Image (tube, rainbow, N blue to C red):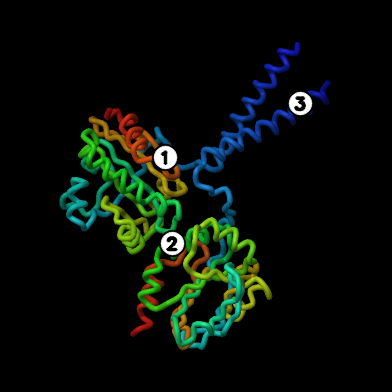
Amino acid sequence: MKLKRVLSFFFALTLCVLATQGVATALQEDWLKAGDPLPKITLLSPKNPAHKEYLGLSGEASFQIPDIKAEVVIVEIFSMYCPHCQKEAPAVNKLYKMIENHPTAKGKVKLIGIGARNDMFEVDFFRKKYEIEFPLFDDEDYTKHEACGEPGTPFFFVVKKNKDGSTDVVLIQLGGFDSPESFLQTVLDKAGLT
Amino acid sequence: MMKRSAYFFVLVLFAGLFVGGFNTEVLSKVPEKDIYQPGALEPIDSTLKVRVGDQAPDFVLPAVTGGNVALSDYRGKKNVVLSFIPAAWTPVCSDQWPGYNIAKEFFDANDAILLGISVDNIPTLFAWTNQMGKLWFPVLSDFYPHGGYAQKLGILRSNGVTERAIFVIDKQGVIRYIDVHDINKPPRLKSIVQAMEQLGK
């Protein structure tokens, strides 16, 4: 009898934990998650020729994430106004440099940033301030941040392009990552590039 | 027996809420839990009492770092940008001053000082701005008499918070730019920079 009561207590506790986490998720975490369809985000082609070449774009005025010449695209949603993004900027720069020097990742993994609710002036200022070399895009009309479910920033999502042309969101990261090394390794693992 | 079961259920529910809440906290790396969500508000809810070209009324307000700051302290020395935010611990405000905090060079280039002002009291502003890291500009409290300076400008809303507003005042104390912004959206940095650049022309 006693054992039965103890077991039922833990069963009920587990149900409550799951239920409260479910409620918390519904209230707070309605942003993009791994396994969700890739949101439709249209970006203006960068003016910088080096960025255009990096993304494998030619004459088109606008493009979408699957148009980027890569097997995997890491998208960072940041904001010039967000102190967490300011703090994270050097680590993200390091991630970019690591990718470009990584024997497996170089050419296959590309990194872009989208300034949530930022206009081009704010994005350009952020780029200059933190000497960011990878392409950054604005979100003046708020639509791109909204398409991702308005997550807190910084927010990263990783898109894997499949051979049949389909895409999978294989990883998301809310907030800064532990280290660029471990994050890149996780990206490669999740995308099956290891 | 029924009473005991109900007691048991309530106990387990509280235990579950505690454990569930704790886990959610650990998973969420961005401390957005501290941000109060007021929802969409009436964009503007006050009537301006000053215009571009007017002499700015003076103020003496306490600063978070201690002491008082007066607008007249800067007369003949610095251009002044006043950034009014409606309330501490609210979404747009919490992401506004941290942006200006990395943009000091624009203010320096235009021989301007930025003063952040809110009707919150000093302890609240102290705790809130501490979360932003070290700010390079003074943060002032227009708490008592409540919103006294905001009322002189005509930017105190009917619920006692100010508009989200920017005032650019030149070294002679003349108001050269006013943006009483939609409270739900941040003013663009570009607009403030352009307004400061107009001062020298």
Q: Chain of mark 3?
A: B
Q: Nearer the viewer, mark 2 or mark 3?
A: 2
Q: Quadrant of the C terminus of chain A?
A: top left
x, y percentage for residue A104?
Answer: 23, 33
Of the pair A4 and A22, the residue shown nearer to us:
A4
Q: Nearer the viewer, mark 3 or mark 1?
A: 1
The residue where tag 1 is placed is A178
Query: How far apart are the two marked residues, 2 and 3, measured between alpha carbons?
Result: 50 Å
Q: Nearer the viewer, residue A88 or A113?
A: A88
Residue B99: give its label: 2
Compute the Cα span from label 3 to label 1: 41 Å
| Residue under the image location 23 percent in, 55 percent down | A46
Quadrant in the rendering for residue A39? top left
Q: Nearer the viewer, mark 1 or mark 2?
A: 1
Mark 3 lies on residue: B8
Q: Residue at x 41, y 66 (%)?
A: B188
| Vertical comparison of A117 with B198: above or below | above
**Chain at tag 2:** B
* Figure check: A67 above or below B86: above
Q: Secondary structure at mark 1?
A: loop
For residue B56, side relative to residue A133 (left or right)? right
Looking at the rendered structure, which numbered label has been put on residue B124?
Answer: none
Few, some or many residues within 10 Å of mark 2 (<14, 14–19, 20+): many
**Residue type at the position of mark 1:** Asp
Tell me the subunit letter for badge 1: A
Q: CA distance from mark 1 to mark 2?
A: 24 Å
Counting residues from the N terminus, which is met first, the one under dot 2 or under dot 3?
Answer: 3
Q: Residue at x 41, y 41 (%)?
A: A177
**Residue B147, horizontal then vertical, whole percent:** 63, 74
| Residue B44 in sight in this render | no
Q: Residue furthest front?
A: B66
Looking at the rendered image, the quarter that the N terminus of chain A falls into is top right
